[in-house]
Image: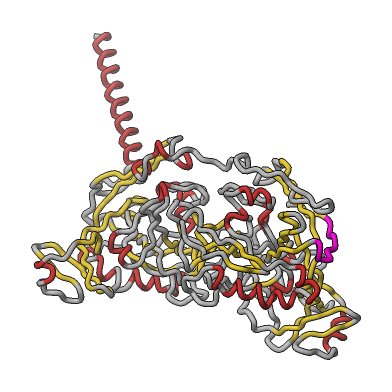
Amino acid sequence: MERTSKKKIIFICGIVLALLLAGCLTFLWLNNRPGKAGLSNPRITEDGRLPGGKKTTWDCVSFGSYPNREVSADDKLLGAKWENDEAVVDGVGYVRMETSSGYRYFTKEPITWRVLEVTDDKALLVSHNLVDCYPYNIEARDVLWCDSDLRKFLNGDAFYGKAFSEEEKECILKSTVQNSKNYYFGTDCGDATEDYVFVLSEEEVFYSENAKKHGFAASDSVNDLGRRFVPTDYARARGAWVSRAGETDGFGFWFLRTNGYSQSNAVFVSEMGCLYNRGCYVNCIDSGVLPAIWVNLKKADLAAEYDFSTDMVIDVDALGKGGAGGNAEYSYTPVSNGTLSEPVIEADASKSSGQRTTWDCVYYGSYPQSEVIRSTDAYPVEDYAVKEGDLIIDDDLYDRLSGAEWTNNEAEVDGERYLRTRGGTFSASSQHYRWDDEERYHYFKYEPLKWRVIEINGDELTLLSDRLVDCAPYNRESTAVSWENSYLALFLDVEFYDEAFTPEEKEAIIYDYIENNKNRKYGTGSGIASPARVYVLSGEDVFLDNKAVRHGFYAKTGVDDPAKRFRPTMYAMSKGTWYSPVDTYRGNGFWFMRTNGYSPSSATYICDMGYIYDHGTDVTCNDSGVLPVIRVDAAKAELVYAGKVSS
């Protein structure tokens, strides 16, 4: 009897343990699959083959419909009854698009979405493809998400009204969308908005717990396969750019709703899956559109139709692990003309590039640089943007400049040359020079231009400015343009050249052809070889070439190179040059190269961090610093040695 009771107790305990175990397993299962309709949060596992070392798998669902695949026109399509460029033929919906060469036809198909998050009875979905093409804003201006044309496009009849039936609209939640500041630059992105449809933000695709939960890489610089998206046929026909380079072949780029380094720019995710946090101009016309929505799972009839994993994006075995590497495959032997030497590179583990460069410097020519202010004047820029000597605080000198005789806004006081200019030349926003009013003159002193010696060929010296000395767009109009026809080329070779050098100094400046090679990543042509006296560096001058090492730069990609960081003069900032608020790079500007970007209407540039943006930005970007280059005949030039500078 006692033995039987023990058996019963053991049996009951076994049942209790089994129930507890089942309860725990159920809890764990529910925690992983918390939503309705069997939808799951993204599943993340370790995978050393992939960028970032993670593999993400998303549930995919169908919801709504939109033009997608292009089809050839047959008699049925040509003879269909079209209303507002839509028709149904044999039960299939079609959309047609009128072009200069006639109509193009597309099937209207269910939209596939990835499930980014399941919370209680709702789910966050993001489109599996770039479904359309539309700028962040039609006009190039400061604009927040709340007022952007892309927000209006997505929430109006163009997308929301076209993509969803009335029943489907009942399932879409009007959500409070937060618009956090830019992670690096602190740019204000506006108040929260109430949206049915939106695009993702920085916070939702990198750096935050939200981004990790959504299955994305925590780093913005990782070429995250999960952030790569392919434009549909319809999106490409509407103008969405598509890469034709190597492993990114077929992918496009897409805007986030976060502003870039200024409110006239928006952050985008490149075809590689990394973020360009500085952004590009809001009126960029060939960005793909990646819509996102929150849906009510109690109303929406959704079910996971299949899984999509990051290792399905490309052949992962062909990826390679990559890495920053170094300059090992690029080399050169520095030369000297007896007095001056080419850049000297030394190993330095404290630098992000792993190296330190030292340049010989010379003075040649002169240009407005430092500003004269009164002791009672507020600084026109933040303290951190002021380098020693940038401001001359002298009440007496200021008063004498105010009363001087000016010709063409130039005057000479105590044997020194000065330029005066008035405000209103640039509409200042954060990290820009602050004009107190449009009437008061500001005074800038002409000072010797300091140049780094970056190349020596016999008596011919190639000199690179030590500061960003002015501000000018690559081009005044947003159009396809190569270096030889650009506004910046004309500005440097005429206006800057005439202003900076005396007739005697001009005699020693070499006028010869410079090469304008293709963008090495995108294959975009950058024009023909063209003659120049003053110019800017090219892509090959600063990376992926022996010339880059010869000039003192880190040649490979993926590194914030201290040797490529330059600060604007006070005069350059007064002309509109942006300066960085980011701790490590405070006061640095960015500067155009003469190589076109991913398209002929964009130009590459080096950012404040010293990182190359070979995707580029629109050629009309108007707050880039100018970093001139000249070649001089040392046998003719009266050069003054200016010591050494180091990265």
Compare residues 333 and 52 and report the one nearer the observer. 333
On screen, 37 above or below 461? above
What residue is drawn where x is 44% and y is 36%? 49
Q: Is residue 277 above or below residue 32?
A: below
Q: Residue at x 35, y 37 (%)?
A: 28
Magenta segment boundaries in residue numbering: 635-643
By what rule are the colours in the image chosen? secondary structure
Q: Is residue 416 left or right of residue 470?
A: right
Q: Residue at x 20, y 74 (%)?
A: 85
In this view, 313 is above or below 532: above
- In front: 534, or 18? 534
From the image, which quarter does the N terminus lie in? top left
Viewer-side residue, 270 vs 464? 464
Quadrant assignment, res 425: bottom right
Image location of residue 396, percent across then percent down: 90, 82
Between 506 and 569, the residue placed more toward the observer is 506
- Residue 209's x, y, as percent? 48, 49
- State the image coordinates of residue 327 (x, y, percent, origin top left): 63, 43
Asked whether residue 420 appears in the rendered view, the answer is: yes
